[in-house]
Amino acid sequence: MSRKCEVCGKGTVSGNNVPRKGLPKKEGGAGQHIGVKTKRLFKPNLVEIRANGGGRRMKVCTRCLKTGKVF
């Protein structure tokens, strides 16, 4: 099964991991320097529940559960 919400379709998204060194200028430092960016994945917060009175198993994101889109 894929890592995707069955209600809203939210899935994994790729992005960058950005390492930062140094103290920001706002906090009295010389400024931050950015290192080498590497790829990473942002995964949705999925929960497996039984929907429709316990009849069907679904993978649903916690945002859909909180807003009441699934019962």
Image (cartoon, rainbow, N blue to C red):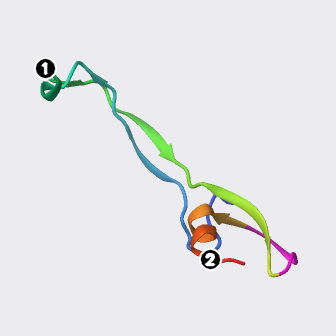
* Residue under the image location 65 percent in, 71 percent down: 6
Q: Is residue 21 magenta?
A: no
Residue corresponding to mark 1? 28
* Residue under the image location 85 percent in, 80 percent down: 53
Query: On the image, which quarter does residue 67 sit in?
Result: bottom right
Query: On the image, which quarter does residue 11 sit in?
Result: bottom right
**Quadrant where the C terminus is found in the figure:** bottom right
Confirm whether residue 20 shows in the render.
Answer: yes
**Amino acid type shown at disc 2:** Gly
**Where in the figure is residue 59, as x and y percent of width and height?**
71, 64
The residue closer to the viewer here, 40 or 61, is: 61
Span shown in magenta: 53-58
**Where in the figure is residue 57, as x and y percent of width and height?**
81, 69
Residue corresponding to mark 2? 68
* Residue under the image location 50 percent in, 44 percent down: 41
**Amino acid type shown at disc 1:** Gly
The residue closer to the viewer here, 64 or 11, is: 64
**Where in the figure is residue 33, as x and y percent of width and height?**
20, 23
